[in-house]
Structure formats: structure tokens, C-alpha cells
Image (cartoon, rainbow, N blue to C red):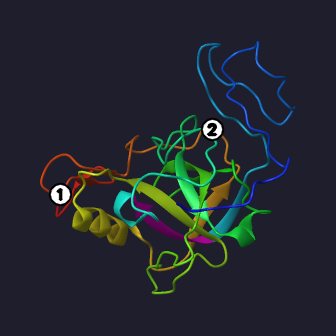
Amino acid sequence: MRRMLLLGSLIALASCTQSSGPTLPPTIQSQGSPNSSCYVVKQTPTTVSATITFYGWPDNSPPGNKISHPIIHKHAGGDGTYCNPTTFATEHANNSEIPYGIKIYVPFIKQYFIREDLCAPSGPKSGSGSKGCHGLWFDLWIGGNAQSKKSAVFACEDKLTPNGKVSVILWPDSGEPVAYPGPIYRNAPPPDGTCDGKAEGS
């Protein structure tokens, strides 16, 4: 599991589901109907250039879906939408710029993500071969479970990892397009599942 030290009060956490709950700070607002839940942090969107990699059930540390700092999920997950962004990890050094609870939008994947995890000491490997989550680097949860075929998950990660840095929006607005809501890697159809909406090997 990717570990971390608790973040201070830079970002407050909120379920946004019931008006009878704790008073929300002004940066956090409820979105949707009273019975819906949407974690919203209002900040000015900023576009950065960052390294993107992927991790899933078989190469999490340890293997599984545990995360170091749950915000809206108890385990790594999400469907990539604004109200249910998917888990991502980065390194300790990014805690001030990329705090736990920040949402990002990754245009080339067309999905939203939320920081709930910390890169493992060994770190992922980028498309250019560098390793370790150093610098502005986002390791995105790709999915998988105990029944996933390891080689298929790894093939999906490799297939989607860019060779260089790409644009990422920090604190994005809710109106960005979302493609293929749900886990990026899915077990069905067999034998190798799907990767970003397409059958592996296609």
C-alpha cells in the first residue's frame, strides 16, 4: 500500500450528501440533488505537463486495491467521472502542490482522477524508461481484481503509458468530456479483458 503522512488542513474532506452533516468550508460545495454525493473542491483550473503511468491490482504494493489515504473511496476505484474520479498516486515531494483530495483531469484518457495514494518506494516506470514517480508524476489506478490476468493488466498499462510528458488539468471544472466511464481495465470479455474500452489485442 502506498503510504503517506496525513495532510494538514489545506483540503477539507466532505461527503456532501446531507445538509445535517458538519458545516462545509467555503471551498467545498455540494453538487447535484440532496440525495446525491459529489466531492467538489473549488480552485482555479491549472494545466501542467506531467509524466503519466498506471498501476492496478497486480502491481500495487502489496498486490490488491489498498490505498494510503482514502478520501472518497475505501479502496482504489472510481469510474473516471467528475463526481466519482478514479484513484491516483504521486510522491511525497508533491504533497504541497498535489495534496490528497485534489482532482485532476487527464485529457488523453478523458477521465477525472483524485489523489488517494502514494507511490511505492520502488515506483512505476515511465514510457521513457525512467523510474520512481519523481517530479510531477501521476500514477493512475487502472483497475483489476484478484481474478485479473496479470499479463493483460500489465499490457494495458504499457499500451496506455505515454512516452513523454502530457497535459494534465489540476482542479478541473466539471464539464470536461468523459470517455468510457468505469475502470480503465476490465476483466471481461475473456481471456484478456478490455483496455480503455477496447478488447485487449485489438
Q: Are marks 2 and 1 in contact (CB under 8 Å)?
A: no
Magenta extent:
50-56
Given residues 196 and 58, the one toward you in this image is 58
Q: Is residue 70 above or below residue 88?
A: above
Is residue 197 in view from this perspective? yes
Q: What residue occupies the far bottom of the structure in this picture? A: 129
Q: What element does badge 2 sit on?
A: loop
| Circle on res. 174 | 2
Q: Is residue 55 magenta?
A: yes
> How many discs mark residues in the rendered view?
2
Q: Residues within 10 Å of mark 1 (few under 14, many from 20)?
A: many
Q: Horizontally, is 145 left or right of 22 in the view?
A: left
Q: Quadrant of residue 15?
A: top right
Q: Quadrant of residue 70?
A: top right
Q: Amino acid at mark 2?
A: Ser
Tell me where residue 23 appears, x and y as whole percent: 84, 23
Q: Horizontally, is 194 left or right of 70 in the view?
A: left
Q: Horizontally, is 191 left or right of 151 in the view?
A: left
Tell me where residue 66 appears, x and y as whole percent: 49, 52
Q: From the image, which quarter does the C terminus lie in?
A: bottom left
Q: Is residue 51 above or below residue 4?
A: below
Q: Residue at x 39, y 41 (%)?
A: 182
Tell me where residue 92 appears, x and y as whole percent: 70, 69
For the stretch drawn in magenta, the main secondary structure is strand
Tell me where residue 17 appears, x and y as whole percent: 66, 20
Q: What residue occupies the far left of the structure in this picture? A: 191
| Circle on res. 192 | 1
Q: Is residue 200 above or below residue 129?
A: above
